[in-house]
Image (tube, grey):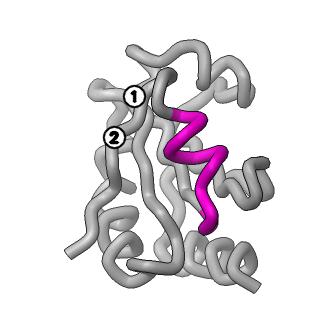
Amino acid sequence: MSKPVNVDDAEFQASVIDSDVPVLVDFWAEWCGPCKMIAPVVDELATEYDGKVKFTKLNVDFNPQTSAKYGVRSIPTLLIFKGGSPIDQVVGAVPKSVLAQRLDKALA
């Protein structure tokens, strides 16, 4: 079973920007209720899209540089990167179908 990988400011370039497959980055924090609500959905999608999309989580409390760089102001924010650039953004806890649709679009 595939699980989202935790990344930090230092690993972001190698894990996300340099990835040869699309990457979903879940910007979250321990104290965030909606982040906890969406976490199981992200875990399920990580399994379903295993091998096609890379899933990562970035704790905004410990990684302010990356959060600021991509203008993350509210969490959860999910950014989808493709070819080293963010191509889509979802803010807040959304239904699994919405995320799946966005991922399918990134893979198209």
Q: Secondary structure at mark 2?
A: strand
Q: Identify the mark at residue 6; answer none if there is no mark.
A: 2
- Tell me what residue is drawn at x 44 percent, y 59 percent: 55
Examine the structure image and report whether residue 74 is included in the region drawn in magenta.
Answer: no
Relative height, residue 58 to residue 89 (above, below)? above
Q: Identify the mark at residue 103; answer none if there is no mark.
A: none
- In the rendered image, which quarter contains the N terminus? bottom left
- Tell me what residue is drawn at x 57 percent, y 58 percent: 23
Q: Which residues are magenta?
A: 12-22
Query: CA–CA distance between discs 2 and 1?
Result: 8 Å
> Percent from the top left, x then y, of residue 94?
53, 61
> Percent from the top left, x then y, of residue 36?
30, 45
- Tell me what residue is drawn at x 71 percent, y 52 percent: 89
Q: Secondary structure at mark 1?
A: strand
In terms of image quadrants, where is residue 6?
top left
Relative height, residue 2 to residue 101 (above, below)? above
- Tell me what residue is drawn at x 48 percent, y 46 percent: 26
- In the rendered image, which quarter contains the C terminus? bottom right
Examine the structure image and report whether residue 20 is included in the region drawn in magenta.
Answer: yes
Query: Do the CB atoms of the residues marked 2 and 1 lie less than 8 Å apart?
Result: yes
Q: Badge 2: few (under 14), some or many (20 or more) residues near its Cα, within 10 Å?
A: some
Amino acid type, callout 1: Asn
Foreground residue among 106 and 15: 15
The residue that disc 1 covers is 59
